Amino acid sequence: MPRVPCPKCRKSGEPRSLFPDMSSVRLLRMVSYFYARSCEREEERRDELVHDLQRSVGRAFDCATAVRAADEVHRLYAASRDDYDRLLGVIRKQLDLQPAENAGRVFALLAQFSETNEEHQICVLLTAALLETLLGELLVRMHVRAGSGWGAARRDLEQRLRGYDKRKREFGQLAGIGLCEAISGAGVPRFYDDWQVLRELRNRFLHGFPYVIDRMAAENAFELAKNCFGMFAYLQNRLCVGQPEG
């Protein structure tokens, strides 16, 4: 309410802008939804692997054993894909196969197994969009703090400051410190570095490399999403909100 003083700057009597903005809130909800769905899809794929192994070999396997066997096959195949006999030996050991049970029959099932799904990719793409939306909104507020009107600040963002690199440079000019340095003061280790990794994955994905986004990338994206409102609230309070006099 306009009559209630802001706890930071103590101003009252006029409407205050909403933080985070509704677009950012919506994006965070979408990230949360697709992250939860990605976890469900992972479980579905693990169950499918167990079912396929049971159908192929004729006996039951627990989920942890099946996934561990698939991970080991992936690791060895990447290191020495021509050593087929060694791979079959690993399968026999991991699944405790009997001599009469054909390891070659399950090789394709294990080699093709992946917990990565489309929801992982969506989670990464939406988190990248969320962070850049928050950065854009922060720049608007920084311009307003420097004396611009809201409309002029938003037009400047849309017309002159399109793209992350331009916005990052603008942040440094307005704040007097780099974005990395500003973020490091918030006490959230690796936030800036993980953000840059996320951006690189997003860009490579969009330029024709669909398999660069995996389960771990989605996990890291979700951690960034969970911390992003606190991070940008810290930056806004540090750079945009006036301090009380006295």
Image (spheres, rainbow, N blue to C red):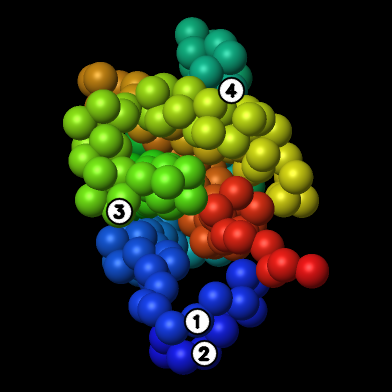
Q: Which tag is nearer the camera, tag 4 or tag 3? A: 3
Nearer the camera: disc 2 or disc 4: 2
Q: Earlier in the sequence, mark 2 or mark 3?
A: 2
Label 2: how many Cα within 10 Å (few below 14, some 14–19, many 20+): few
Q: CA distance from mark 2 to mark 3?
A: 22 Å
- The percent position of residue 201, horizontal first and vertical second, equals 42, 29
Between the residue at mark 4 and the residue at mark 3, the CA separation in whole angstroms equals: 57 Å
Q: Which residue is mark 1?
A: 12
What's the residue type where badge 4 is placed?
Answer: Leu
Which badge, 2 or 4, comes first in the chain's sequence? Answer: 2
Callout 1 secondary element: loop
Q: Nearer the viewer, residue 187 or 199?
A: 187
**CB atoms at circles 2 and 1 under 8 Å apart?**
yes
Of residue 36 and residue 56, the one placed in the foreground of this image is 36
On the image, the x and y values in percent for residue 3 come to: 46, 91
Residue type at mark 3 is Trp
Secondary structure under tag 4 reads helix
Left or right: 137 with respect to 182? left
